[in-house]
Each structure stands twice: as structure tokens, then as C-alpha cells.
Amino acid sequence: MMDMGSRMNVYLATVLVGVVRMVFGLLTSQLLRTYGRRSLTMFSGLGMAVCMTTSGYYTQLIMTGQIEKSLIPVFCILFYVAISVIGMLSIPWTMTAEIFPLVNSQLPNLFLNPKFPMFTAMGPSPAIVYITEVARPDLRGALICIGPSITSLGMVIVYALGAVLHWRTVAWLSLAYILIPLVASFLWTPESPVWLLNKGRANQALKSLKYLARNYKEDGKAEKLLRDLEKEQELKKMNSTKENQSLSARLIKMVTMATGIKPLLVITVLFALQQLAGIYITIFYAVQFLEDMGSRMNVYLATVLVGVVRMVFGLLTSQLLRTYGRRSLTMFSGLGMAVCMTTSGYYTQLILAGQIEKSLIPVFCILFYVAISVIGMLSIPWTMTAEIFPLEIRGIAQGLTFCLAHILMFFALQYYPWFKDSVGGSAMVQWFFALISVISIVYVYIFLPETHGRTLLEIEEYFETSCVYACSKKRRASAAILQNQSPKIVVSKETTD
């Protein structure tokens, strides 16, 4: 905002960006029930291009002194954020669930799919709910983690470009990337069969399923999947609230249901611990964070390595989530993060006190910290939002959860510089992150339920009767499931609102 020559206070403008993203995140959950993915994505891409072009034009005029400082670039950025949320920020997650569970269960085929470029320029989004539309239960968690992995590839590209190019050049290149998913969506993206069937367009749903299931050798696979979806739609009509229920009524229903408020509280606290443990701070403040540690390595090279590590371990996580439970991965991740941050803080303290020379040890600790965070504390909270809410409130519950998660992220990122100065420097910050990581282990052990290998109905039944997982009978049942898994090829029994 400062580099745009804005007349508005930059901190106020930053707060407005967060508010706009939150509001339009809630609105998106409604729009996705009414409009098609293709139309929303193309409309979003077009709007983003117009906003950034206009903002860049006025910024250029302001910086060259041809006009005085103006609010126009700020409003363009606010519109850009708003219009990205309703399409380009959220829809790509939809595609991971709609293509891969039906086309092929082998996750590596992601890179052979023509929509691969779409993911290289996308960020995490509130639309993970669509993973559950057609995903097999045993693949659900792995598929949700694919998006952030490819997002990490986009981060690596941007980090690398930022190390050699001016930030404005990088910004214009990022704007150009929008054209890739825009064209890909138009050419290769079929509409969601679940959405089509929900709108009474069964023939189009069948056509979409035939395209998605085109690699199956079994005859009549698309027709069988359509019958399964139709049965699920009938169950939804029998058990869920009316489709025309207002947003406020659905919010009230969510907070008054045990199966709504309990998982909301459990996952929100986990997101809070995620932010307080420094996961996103080390990503967004990578250059500054590494400089404060007194590293011998070039900070821009180290930042690129952070992006590469996140990408590689993100892909590994998609495989781990098919084998290991959410609880065990999260607790292992928290333990590894605590060890890495404790060690890094110790060496940072010695370096800054002049007791030892600058070293690579803190940098390697941060790289291990990022790697170990990806396989648990970074990925799993986002994964579990698609699993823990019941069918009738899933859309609005996930929208609210992601709003709260991004608000927590916003405050964590905004207050980090102040917090670092308040506690006495980088070493104390790292030890604080280690302490929160230990607290997260205890929290996960006591409260976080195991969802791997369980149906969504079983998860719902747990929240109906329990809230302390460490004392729950379901805990022993989950352990048995993890030891005796037998993946089933089914269309998941949940759909979005």
C-alpha cells in the first residue's frame, strides 16, 4: 500500500483488506450454491485483471508525479481482493475433488492433468468443502493437501523472482498468471456433477460424470455414480434444512447444534495454536526472520529454500495422510517444531550475543521446522474442516471457520513486529513458538478427534456425545481402524449445502 502512493493510512487500508476478505468469504459460500464454477472463475479472473490494470495505471501516474496521491489504487486493491475470493481464490480447490477421485486414484497423475498450471498460481482458500463432494474417504485428506503443495510451488517461483527482479515486475508477472487458469477453466473444467444434480440438471450431471470417469474400464461407471449421487440427494432432502433458509437462520442453527459448535470450537483453537506457533509468520516474514537470526546464508536464497521445502513436504503429506492418523501426525509435527525452534533460538541467542560467529545451524533448524510443520500443524487443520461438520451446516460452518482462521492469521502477521520488540528479540520469539508447539501437542492429545478412516457420520456421532477425545471410546475404535484399513471405492456420502 505504501508503494502505491495511497492517501489512506496504510494500516487502515490493511485492516479493510482483511474485512473485505472475511465478508466475501461468507458471501462465496452462498454464490457457489447458485452459480457454476466456470462462470465464477472466469468472472473473477476478468475482474482481477481489470482491478490490477487500473491500479497499476494510477500507481504509475502517482509515482511519476503526474497526479497527486489518490484513493483509487486502494479501492482497486479492495475490489481485487473481493472479486478474487468469489472465484480464483476458492474454486481451484473444487477441481481437485471433482477430477482425481473419479479419473484416477493415483495422486501423482495431478502433474499429468491439463489443469496443473491452474494450481501453480493459486493460494489456499475457503472452498476446501468441495473436496468432500465426490472424494473417497481414504483419499479425502490427501487430496485436500494437494492444493497447498502446488501453492508452495507458486511461492517458490515468486520467491525466486523476488530475489532477482524488482517487486513491481514480479507483481505484473503475477497478474499475467491469471490468464493461465482462466483459459484452463474455459477449456478443460467440467461443472461439478453434485452441483448440477442439486439444481435438477441430471443430464448435464451424467455428461460431467462421463468425462470425469472416462478412464474407468468398468462399463456404466458414470451411470452408477449418478445413481449414488441421486440417493445422496434424496437423503439430503430428508435430513437437511430447507434450501431457502436464510444465512442468519443457518448460523443460529450451527451454533445451537452440538455437532456444529463443538467442532467449530475445537478447530478454531487449533487454528489459533497454528498461528501462535509461528508457522505463517516464518513464511510471510521469511527474509526479515532469517536476517534477525544472524544467518551466514544469503537470506533470499534461504527464503527460496523455505518455499522448496514446503512444496516437497506438502507432496509427501498427501501420501502420509492416506496412511497415518491426523492426531499422530499433528502431535509428531508439534514435537518436531518445538525441538527445531528451541535449538534455533539457542544458537540465535549465542550469535546475537557475540559468543559464536554467524552459523548455518539456525537456517537449517528453520528449514526442518517448515518441513515438519507441513506434515501436521500447517496442513491438518485445513484438512479437518472438510470432515468434522455435519452435512446440513457444512457450507456455512466451513465459511465461518475459514473467516476465523484468516482473522487469526491477520492479527498474527500484523502484531509480529511489535511482539518481537516486546519480548526481547528473535531468540525469545523462537522460544515462544516452541512453547506453543508443546501446548499444541497436549491440546491435540486431549481434544482433537481422529477422522482418518472414519465416515463423516461416525465423526458427527462423536461430536454429538463427546468433546474430550482422550476419554472417548472412539479413540480405541480409531486405533483399530488405522491398523485394519480397507479402502473402499465409493463416492463420499456428503455433499455441500
Image (spheres, rainbow, N blue to C red):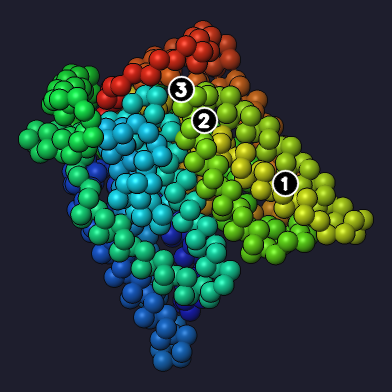
Q: Is residue 35 left or right of residue 384?
A: left
Can you name the residue that lies furthest to the bottom here? 66
Residue occupying the point 54% across, 45% down? 312
Q: Residue 332 location, x and y as percent?
A: 63, 29
Q: Amino acid at mark 2?
A: Leu
Which residue appears at 19% of the width and 43% of the height?
Answer: 191
Q: Which circle, 1 or 2, is nearer the viewer?
A: 2
Q: Quadrant of the C terminus?
A: top left
Mark 3 and mark 1: Cα distance apart in space: 30 Å
Give coordinates of residue 161: x percent, y percent: 52, 68
Q: Residues within 10 Å of mark 2 (few under 14, many from 20)?
A: some
Is there CB contact under 8 Å for labels 3 and 1? no
Q: Specify the farthest residue to the right.
A: 355
Q: Which residue is mark 1?
A: 365
Q: Is residue 483 above or below residue 434?
A: above
Q: Residues within 10 Å of mark 3 (few under 14, many from 20)?
A: many
Q: Amino acid at mark 3?
A: His
- Going from the N terminus, do you reach mark 3 or mark 2 first? 2
